[in-house]
Image (tube, rainbow, N blue to C red):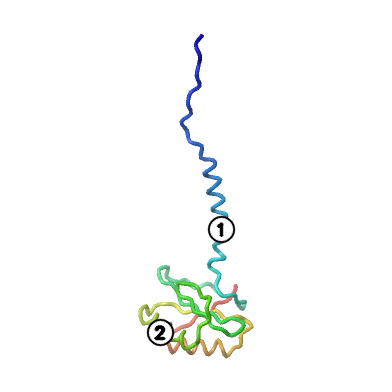
Amino acid sequence: MARRGRRLNAEMNVVPYIDVMMVLLVIFMVTAPMLTQGVSVELPKAPADPIQSEQNQEPVIVTVNADGLYFLSHGGKDTEPVELSLIQQQVAKILAEAPKTKVFVRGDKRVQYNLVVGLMVALQEAGAGTVGLVTEP
């Protein structure tokens, strides 16, 4: 009696790999906004169009939180408060190396007006010709 054998299936089952990739995609989608979050501020709302920036240049962002503390961000995290004089020195050094770097201020809507004005004066003394204000749409 001749026995008929089954043919071997040489195809690879990729369904488990697709499942793993979907789980990784969801994990990255959930964690990515958390990683880019810096200092928590409540921005004022304003109907302004977003500014187009050059893709290869990281802007300088100075944040003033509700407690009146300053945070400097340029290509990194801004988790430590920084003195205003140190911000002025660091921004001057950044602008000396790359004069076309954009400078933005993120001010909490509850912060005192004179703190934001003082920051903008310090940034202009550091060499920033124009300073943009970040708002919520």
Looking at the figure, which quarter contains the C terminus?
bottom right
Which secondary structure, mark 2?
helix
- Judging depth in this view, the residue of 3 and 51 nearest the camera is 3
Against 24, residue 63 (above or below) is below
Q: Which corner quadrant of the image does residue 29 belong to?
A: bottom right
- Crowding at dot 2, Cα within 10 Å, few <14 / some 14-19 / many 20+, comes out as many
Name the disc covering residue 7, or none: none
Which secondary structure, mark 1?
helix
Percent x, y of residue 34: 57, 65
Q: Residue at x 54, y 57 (%)?
A: 28
Percent x, y of residue 104: 49, 79
Marked residue nearer the N-terminal end (2 or 1): 1
Identify the residue at the far right of this view.
Answer: 110
Percent x, y of residue 35: 54, 66
Q: Which corner quadrant of the image does residue 27 belong to?
A: bottom right
Percent x, y of residue 25: 54, 53
Residue to which mark 2 is pinned = 92
Residue to which mark 1 is pinned = 29
- Crowding at dot 1, Cα within 10 Å, few <14 / some 14-19 / many 20+, comes out as few
Q: Which corner quadrant of the image does residue 44 belong to?
A: bottom right
Kind of residue at disc 1:
Met
- Judging depth in this view, the residue of 34 and 100 nearest the camera is 34
Measured in 3D between alpha carbons, the distance from the residue under mark 2 to the one under mark 1, in whole angstroms, is 36 Å
Kind of residue at disc 2:
Ala
Disc 2 to disc 1: CB gap under 8 Å: no
